[in-house]
Amino acid sequence: EQRKAFHILDDSGVKVLTGGPGTGKTTLLNGLLTVYQSQCPEAKIVLCSPTGMASERMSESTGREAATVHKTLEYRPFGGDDASFKNQADPITADCIVIDESSMIDTELAGMLLDAVPNGCLVLFCGDVDQLDSVGAGAVLKDLIASEEVPVFCLKTLFRQAKESGIVRNALKINQADTNLTIQ
């Protein structure tokens, strides 16, 4: 699964990397960023996520600067008619944009972000569809996957916990609407 996911780097455009906790998304993302930077040493990589805490975790796990999507967009909403943010006329300066925890992005924020993506940019939405949904309207990550219009790379093999641990068994049951949970 992880080897196949390196095809994310084959070309630009919107892609999705998804998988549950412990399936290696962070490890794979670090590998993808390393390979991308070695193939394109002058490329500008932008890492972002919907919350400050998620962007801090992203920075810690990748060793690279990450920011919130709002900061990446230079979003200033309180100017009334003077509200400003990146868009087609003033796109984000990037060759590759990675959005982590993208299950939490609503349609309005995703629309603003995609409107600010420069032509030829690789855009990678990372996340777990079974994690927190957005507070605002929409389920962008789920909809991208369901659209079958963008390449989706799904990690299913668990690495972090033992496959037979109670946490993993119960998480799988919950995702399948089975309330007969195992108590340890």
Image (cartoon, grey):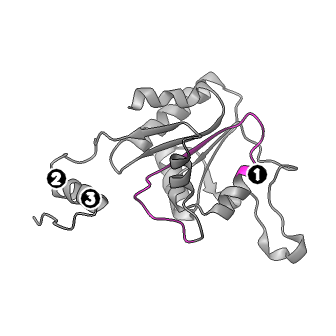
Q: Is residue 42 above or below residue 98?
A: above
Is 94 placed left or right of 139 in the picture? right
Give the residue furthest to the left.
Answer: 184
Q: Position of residue 58 (x, y in %)?
A: 51, 51
Return the residue at label 2. 165
Q: Circle 3 sits on which residue?
A: 171
Question: Which residue is labeled 1 in the image?
Answer: 115
**In percent of the image, x 42 and y 40: which residue is there?**
154
183, above or below 94, in the image: below
Q: Main secondary structure of the magenta part?
A: loop
Q: Residues within 10 Å of mark 3 (few under 14, many from 20)?
A: some
Query: Which percent across, then down, holds residue 149?
Result: 59, 40
**Cα distance between the residues tagged 2 and 1:** 43 Å
16 sits to left or right of 71: left
- Total labels: the figure holds 3
Q: Is residue 97 left or right of residue 131?
A: right
The earlier-in-sequence mark between 3 and 1 is: 1
Marks 3 and 2, Cα distance to the nearest angstrom? 10 Å
